[in-house]
Image (tube, grey):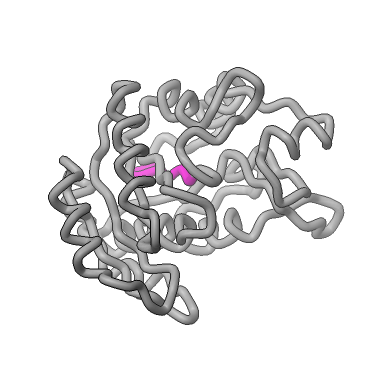
Amino acid sequence: MKRLFVTGTDTEIGKTVVASGLVRAAITAGYRVAGLKPVAAGCETVDGALVNDDARELMRASNVELDYTTVNPIALELPIAPHIAAHQAGVSISVGVLKTHYERNLPDDLDLAVFEGAGGWLVPLNDFETFQDFALRMELDVVLVVGMKLGCINHAMLTVRAIRACGLDLLGWIANFPQPTMDVAEENLDTLMRQIDAPLLGVVPHMDTPDCELVAKHLNIKAIMS
């Protein structure tokens, strides 16, 4: 099983639609794929249980049917930083527990598992662990989604440096345009291509209604699965 961790340069920059697009692109290429959301803050109550829109989008994109709690074991109501939402809800988040959860519940015949983080690379999960620790313990290859907007060069380079410093493999990065327009967009993209020493796996244009099937067409799944 190949396992990816999709992180981003910020929150609200299109991680979920890009992660779902990666799932759909791999399915089109003939693989069995599941999208996963280990921790989600900003959930609503449906039939007595907390559920998250991002997790449900990943489930709809997948071609391996898993129950909701397998996909998203930590669902938090408040749309705030996960460690704060967990503290206020009286919930404990542990990287070790998350690792055990997925080792026990993911089917052995998966070709690809796509884990989506929340916010950016160093978002805390508790007082001692961050999403970086989750990716490390799970030994995940990392795909960075760069939200193409003002400030993205600095955010991208800091995130790349942090990923490399902890010893994980940055498989590549994807440029996503969350806003309808961006000043000097091509110049920013050219700068990132020169500065990031990892493959550009796709450029996703702005979409008024993001669609994972359309996003999938802009991604180089062969480079990811090779």
**Which secondary structure is most common in the magenta stretch?**
strand
51 to the left or right of 12: right
In this rendering, position of residue 60 left or right of residue 8: right
Q: Residue furthest left?
A: 194
Q: Quadrant of residue 86?
A: top right
Position of 44 with respect to 71 (left or right) is: right
Quadrant hosting residue 57: bottom right
Residue 120 is left or right of residue 175, and the answer is: right
Frontmost residue, 102 versus 208: 208
Q: Position of residue 123 (x, y in %)?
A: 55, 35
Q: Residue at x 42, y 44 (%)?
A: 7
Rendered position, 197 above or below 178: above
In the image, is residue 49 part of the stretch drawn in magenta? no
Q: In what quadrant of the picture does the N terminus appear? A: top left
Task: Give the residue at x 53% y 59%.
Answer: 12
Where residue 159 sits, quadrant-wise, is top left
Q: Please state which of residues 207 and 64 is positioned toward the viewer in this rendering.
A: 207
Q: Which residue sits at x=47%, y=38%?
A: 107
Q: How many marks?
A: 0
Up the image or down, 178 lies above or below 160; here it is: below
Nearer to me, 200 or 221:
200
Q: Which residues are magenta?
A: 110-116
- Direction bottom: furthest residue: 208
> Residue shown at 20%/65% (left/top)?
187
Residue occupying the far right of the picture: 48
Give the percent coordinates (x, y) of residue 125.
61, 30
Image quadrant containing the C terminus: top left
Residue 214 at x, y = what percent? 35, 75
The x and y percentages for residue 186 are 21, 69
